Amino acid sequence: MTIVRPLALILSFAVGLSAAGAQDRLADILIDGENWELVAEGFKFTEGPAADSTGRLYFSDVPNNKIYRLNDRGVPEVFIQNSRGSNGLMFGPDGRLYACQFGKKRVVAYDSSGIETVIAADVLPNDLVVAGNGTVYFTEPDKRTVWYVPHRAGSAVPVDQGIQRPNGIILWPKQGTLVVADTAGQNLWTFRIDSNGLLSNKERFYAMLTPPDRGSSGADGMTVDTECRVYVATFLGVQVFDVEGRLIGIIQKPQSAFLSNLTFAGPKFDSLYATSTDKLFRRKTKATGVRYTKPEAVP
């Protein structure tokens, strides 16, 4: 499926979006009476929320070099004592936790006992996504590069260069489309994933709203639900887009501090978790997050 979306049309829709219309669309996601709930606090900078196959939530505290997971009582416990500056996290289909180990300039994967395997080296990774077939895509903002690591291969291949500051990265549910956030810009970019894992059909598919006093969105981490709605952490809050690239609305941030990343977790994958500087939050939703399994035929 080739993605074609006139940028002017997206921009005109975003600018003209009424508060009432946005609320109507968000009503398909948000639950009356449910709001953000504080899960944990006291960290330096939380990032990389990721859920394992059971819905257990993991996240990183980047400056403190730790990766935490929530225990059965919902309390954070240390999973990795020295994460070497790990930032973005995601579980792969093999059950391992993949991590952007910025401090060691590599991408690694941790098994259930915390033993790490190097996936890619000599890079400065920020965020990543792991497809159901085991391939990995990750961003390197400083070099304006998106990388691809083939399944079972030991070297990363640059597959896009030129986005001003590529950051958050996610796949559509059927895994035929890759989405990359531009922190320094106003767009989320989409790519068609070809049969060889390389990218084509690069498009400015989603247009984000920006604060009037800033020229950028501050877009960081992203997640996606089973209805192919994309959720992106921005300066203004959680901006939510539908499958056609239209802005549904903006979910208010859980606190005024920087909002870094999002994911769905919990036993039913229907709780939206958010990392924001020193805290971790969640809120129950009507939506369900995506668990990437081996892709079937992708239209």
Image (cartoon, rainbow, N blue to C red):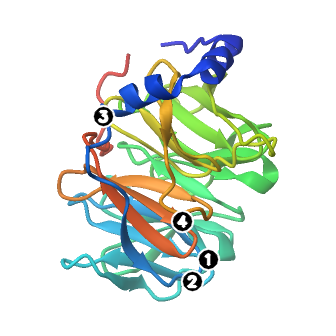
Separation (CA) of disc 1 from disc 2: 5 Å
Vertical relation: 244 (above or below) 248: above
Vertical relation: 102 (above or below) 23: below
Q: Identify the residue position indicated by label 3 in the image.
A: 226
Question: Which element is circle 3 on?
Answer: loop
Residue situated in front as seen by the camera: 64 or 130: 64
Q: Identify the residue position indicated by label 1 in the image.
A: 85
Residue 23: x and y in percent read 41, 31
Separation (CA) of disc 2 from disc 3: 32 Å
Q: Identify the residue position indicated by label 2 in the image.
A: 65
Q: Hey, what amino acid is under mark 2?
A: Asn
Q: Residue 74 falls in which quadrant of the image?
A: bottom left
Asked whether disc 3 touches disc 1, contact meaning CB atoms under 8 Å apart, the reply is no
Vertical relation: 139 (above or below) 288: below
What residue is shown at x 54% (from left), y 12% (from top)? 2
Question: Which element is circle 1 on?
Answer: loop
Locate the C terminus by quadrant.
top left
Q: Identify the residue position indicated by label 4 in the image.
A: 276
Q: Residue 3 falls in which quadrant of the image?
A: top right
Q: Hey, what amino acid is under mark 4?
A: Ser
Asked whether disc 1 touches disc 4, contact meaning CB atoms under 8 Å apart, the reply is no
Question: Which element is circle 2 on?
Answer: loop
